[in-house]
């Protein structure tokens, strides 16, 4: 498939300096082009493109959406959840399901390929994840702040499709 | 606060701008109607005000299959408001404020002045940040919960031609190539003593010109960004100190000994 | 939160406790022979605050006031509802008590409101507690085409 964007060296130039803002009229030094920066266009992953509308919906929920005093998804939490989604993205897997929680946080869920994975995004750098392997019955829970390596391994395991799907009775 | 003795020091480094900043959870009841109250906290030293577009929130996370430098993610109802610049009379010092960020910039221009040193900038930044927290506490019963901090050093290194970069930078070997422009970046993951990643050191080299196009320079930017150990201002300041150390050491590594001599390295 | 968490012994183990659920709590589960829609266990978790609990409605109180529980719990916001017994919560080391809501600007009055609390301060219920409540729950007012767990 032809990529949507040209892959070029991209960098994070979000250093909020005096000169490299949108207005460069006062600067002494200016980059080569007349625009402040050559910025590589880094597309969102398919997951975040698919989830964008749901994120917007959940942050717009009315107070009491759960029938009680439930709060909408906080913007802070949504931003971090989207960053986590981006970091975990694997092209061979469906996007997670988003489930709002009454306290204004959000959960990412996958239930497929004989796994249940539930990732509670409680706030920036406050993540609790749960996994159950339906074949073995084995359950595990981890807490994460910045390093999503272990969680990425869970997602990788999830993406390996069974050749012979086995029904699991409830 | 004393400068750590083990850090390289220069009489006249090509330092052009220093940025210290923290990102925090949005203060729930704050709205732009209180912007004047915030400015009044700093008005005596920063009398001038300007508005800028909001800066986007960032979170330094690690691991995972998608290791591209993070795209700008904007989801959910965006915060309303703008970023405010509070500028000093001499225009060398800047405070930047929005509902979820506070930054302090020093720049060498327009009034060329000696670099006030990290210690001075850091003390002033902490004082101003605590003043802001006092305001949030008194007005909204809220505290600043820092979730990201950053320190950046931007150097502007004049060159005759961009192929001369190799005389200044260890990371470049242009040889006899007639280089028109340079645009190089890479990042390094910084780990704590237990091996857990908590920050990135971002390196950027860009070719720049003066407005009249006659003079050229290389802009070397080193940024240390990540999550402090906890959400307090004290830990954020500690993080910034660690970042400064990493940056200064790395600056010496990525620049040549010939350049060090030109900048008056203190042995 | 108006009430300090407590376990109300006047609520007997066999008493029915109602928990409202929303369409947003529905997930698709592709494990099993056919994909099915069911409730997420996140529907069974507490509100914000270390001493906050999980909101519920107490069926017996509504009967005493001759209020139709099914009608009461699905207004003003249309939701579904599940139920479990008070004893199910206690078996999971949780407490259950009354917390009537009156004159709260964020919620309509609810004199039949109660809470399920953890015995200690915590951000959330444990996974065992949430999933335990989910397993105990049966539909009280079902959402169409959705399994309760």
Image: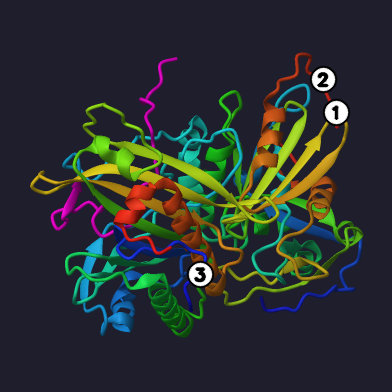
Frontmost of labels 3 and 1 is 3
Q: Residues within 10 Å of mark 2 (few under 14, many from 20)?
A: some
Frontmost of labels 3 and 2 is 3
Q: Nearer the viewer, residue C51 or A120?
A: A120
At 90% from the left and 60% from the top, the residue drawn is C87
At 29% from the left and 78% from the top, the residue drawn is B39
Q: Answer above or below: position of C9 versus C140.
A: below
Q: Tally the marks.
A: 3
**On residue A166, which mark appears?**
2
**Residue occupied by mark 3:** B5
Membership of C101 in magenta stretch: no
**Mark 1: secondary structure:** loop
What's the magenta region?
Answer: A1-30
Residue B84 position, x and y percent, is: 28, 67
In screen coordinates, is C2 left or right of B214? Answer: right
Residue A103 position, x and y percent, is: 62, 60
In screen coordinates, is B27 left or right of A160? Answer: left
Q: Is residue B74 visible?
A: no
Q: Is residue B258 visible?
A: yes
Q: Answer above or below: position of C87 versus B182.
A: below
Q: Residues within 10 Å of mark 3 (few under 14, many from 20)?
A: few
Mark 3 belongs to chain: B
At 45% from the left and 15% from the top, the residue drawn is A1
Q: Are marks 2 and 1 in contact (CB under 8 Å)?
A: yes
Q: Main secondary structure of the magenta part?
A: loop
Mark 2 belongs to chain: A
**Residue occupied by mark 1:** A135
Color encoding of the figure: rainbow
């Amino acid at each position: 498939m032809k990529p949507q964007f040209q892959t070029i060296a991209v960098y994070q130039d979000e250093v909020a300096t005096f000169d490299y803002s949108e207005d460069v009229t006062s600067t002494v030094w200016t980059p080569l082009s007349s625009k402040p920066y050559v910025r590589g266009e880094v597309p969102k992953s398919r997951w975040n493109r698919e989830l964008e509308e749901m994120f917007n919906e959940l942050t717009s929920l009315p107070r009491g959406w759960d029938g009680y005093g439930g709060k909408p998804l906080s913007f802070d939490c949504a931003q971090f959840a989207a960053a986590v989604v981006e970091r975990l993205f694997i092209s061979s897997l469906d996007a997670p399901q988003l489930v709002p929680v009454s306290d204004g946080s959000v959960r990412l869920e996958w239930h497929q390929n004989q796994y249940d994975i539930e990732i509670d995004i409680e706030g920036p750098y406050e993540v609790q994840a749960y996994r159950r392997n339906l074949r073995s019955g084995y359950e595990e829970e981890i807490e994460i702040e910045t390093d999503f390596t272990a969680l990425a391994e869970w997602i990788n395991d999830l993406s390996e499709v069974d050749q012979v799907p086995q029904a699991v009775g409830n | 606060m004393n400068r750590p003795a083990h850090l390289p020091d220069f009489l006249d480094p090509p330092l052009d701008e220093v940025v210290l900043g923290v990102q925090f959870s949005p203060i729930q009841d704050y709205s732009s109607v209180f912007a004047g109250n915030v400015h009044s906290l700093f008005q005596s030293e920063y009398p001038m005000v300007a508005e800028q577009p909001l800066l986007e929130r960032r979170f330094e996370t690690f691991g995972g299959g998608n290791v591209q430098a993070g795209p700008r993610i904007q989801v959910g109802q965006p915060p309303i408001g703008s970023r405010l610049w509070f500028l000093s009379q001499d225009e060398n010092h800047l405070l930047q404020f929005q509902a979820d960020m506070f930054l302090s910039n020093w720049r060498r221009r327009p009034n060329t002045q000696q670099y006030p040193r990290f210690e001075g900038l850091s003390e002033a930044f902490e004082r101003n940040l605590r003043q802001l927290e006092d305001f949030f506490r008194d007005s909204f019963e809220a505290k600043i919960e820092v979730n990201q901090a950053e320190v950046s050093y931007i150097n502007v290194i004049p060159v005759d031609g961009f192929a001369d970069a190799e005389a200044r930078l260890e990371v470049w070997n242009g040889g006899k190539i007639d280089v028109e422009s340079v645009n190089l970046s890479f990042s390094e993951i910084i780990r704590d003593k237990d091996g857990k990643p908590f920050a990135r050191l971002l390196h950027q080299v860009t070719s720049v010109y003066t407005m009249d196009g006659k003079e050229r320079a290389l802009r070397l930017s080193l940024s240390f960004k990540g999550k402090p150990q906890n959400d307090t201002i004290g830990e954020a300041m500690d993080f910034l100190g660690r970042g400064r150390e990493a940056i200064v050491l790395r600056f010496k590594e990525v620049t040549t000994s010939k350049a060090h001599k030109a900048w008056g390295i203190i042995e | 939160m108006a009430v300090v968490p407590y376990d109300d012994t006047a609520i007997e183990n066999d008493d029915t406790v109602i928990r409202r659920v929303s369409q947003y709590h529905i997930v698709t589960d592709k494990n099993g022979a056919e994909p099915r829609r069911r409730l997420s266990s996140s529907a069974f978790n507490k509100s914000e605050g270390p001493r906050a609990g999980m909101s519920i409605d107490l069926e017996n109180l509504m009967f005493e006031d001759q209020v139709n529980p099914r009608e009461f719990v699905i207004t003003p916001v249309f939701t579904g509802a599940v139920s479990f017994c008070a004893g199910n919560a206690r078996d999971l080391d949780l407490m259950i008590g009354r917390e009537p809501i009156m004159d709260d600007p964020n919620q309509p009055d609810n004199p039949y409101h109660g809470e399920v609390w953890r015995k200690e301060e915590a951000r959330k219920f444990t996974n065992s507690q949430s999933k335990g409540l989910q397993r105990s729950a049966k539909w009280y007012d079902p959402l169409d085409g959705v399994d309760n767990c």
